[in-house]
Amino acid sequence: MDVPRTLPARVYLAAYDVQRQKLTRTSRLNHLVRTAALEELTLAGFLRDEDGKVVAPGRERTGDPVLDGVLELVRESQGRHNWKHWVRRHGTRTRKALRDQLEAQRVIRVQPRRILGVVPSDRVTVRDTRAVKALQRTAAQAIGGGTPTPYLDPRDVALAAIAALGEVDTVCRGSVRRDNRRRIKELVALSGPAVPALKKVLSDDASSTAG
């Protein structure tokens, strides 16, 4: 399996635990995938920031159904919402669309099941884990490696920043995140506006849970 092209797919697969054969950080994965889609669209020039609002100029499409789904939602809003709004909103829709896309491409296998015989759920497994391991190494090296952050590929920067903020242990465990706080801060700063928005959303969620 080749390494996926789009950032949402890379984030999704990087969260896959090869040993346990399951996705991790599933409670946060909607936000992480949605942030990755916004970042991909920003890097490609389909989205831009105007006074903190997300704007999608033009009528062009990316050709990727997952990204185009996010792009159309932003265009319909006519620049009324900020980045935090779009990290939060419709994340489940984006994640399911991405899952269906990866299943159709035979990257993953989705098996319906019921937890405790009652609650509907899906078991996701990756057909070929080599690309997963490559993505996880790339992100881990971006976080802990010696290459100056300005010289990293922008998509590797975003992948690493999203994984670190989302506490994706398949990329970087807690000790690694603690030892590389400064580096992670640099990665977040180099990313587009969706990534700092993700940090705020996760912080808000943590505060709400604690309260």
Image: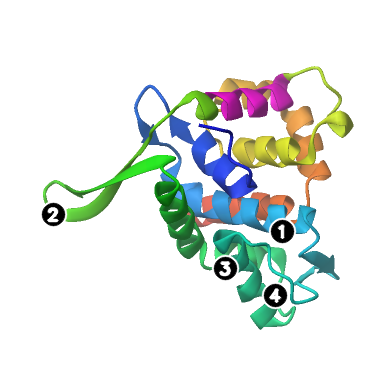
Q: Which residue corresponds to mark 2?
A: 118
Q: CA distance from mark 1 to mark 4?
A: 16 Å
Q: Which residue corresponds to mark 1?
A: 41
Can you say whether 203 is above or below 127 in the image?
Answer: below
Q: CA distance from mark 1 to mark 3?
A: 11 Å
Foreground tag (4 vs 3): 3
SS at circle 4: loop
Q: Position of residue 34 (x, y in %)?
A: 58, 56
Query: Is disc 4 in contact with disc 3, using a CB cutoff of under 8 Å?
Result: no
Q: Amino acid at mark 1?
A: Leu
SS at circle 1: helix
Q: Which mark is residue 187?
A: none
Q: Which residue corresponds to mark 3?
A: 69
Q: Main secondary structure of the magenta part?
A: helix
Q: CA distance from mark 4 to mark 3?
A: 16 Å
Start-end of magenta stretch: 133-144
Q: Amino acid at mark 3?
A: Gly
Q: Position of residue 67 (x, y in %)?
A: 61, 61
Mark 3 vs mark 2: which is more N-terminal? 3
Q: Position of residue 31 (x, y in %)?
A: 55, 54
Q: CA distance from mark 2 to mark 1?
A: 39 Å
Q: How is the image coloured?
A: rainbow
Q: Amino acid at mark 4?
A: His
SS at circle 2: loop
Is 18 displayed left or right of 183 in the figure? left
Could you say which is closer to the camera, residue 20 or residue 106?
106
Mark 1 vs mark 3: which is more N-terminal? 1
Queried whether the magenta region covers residue 139, the answer comes back as yes
Q: Which residue corresponds to mark 4?
A: 81
Classify 10 Å Cα crowding around label 4: few (below 14), some (14-19), many (20 and above): some
Classify 10 Å Cα crowding around label 3: few (below 14), some (14-19), many (20 and above): some
For the view shown, which residue lies furthest in the left direction? 117
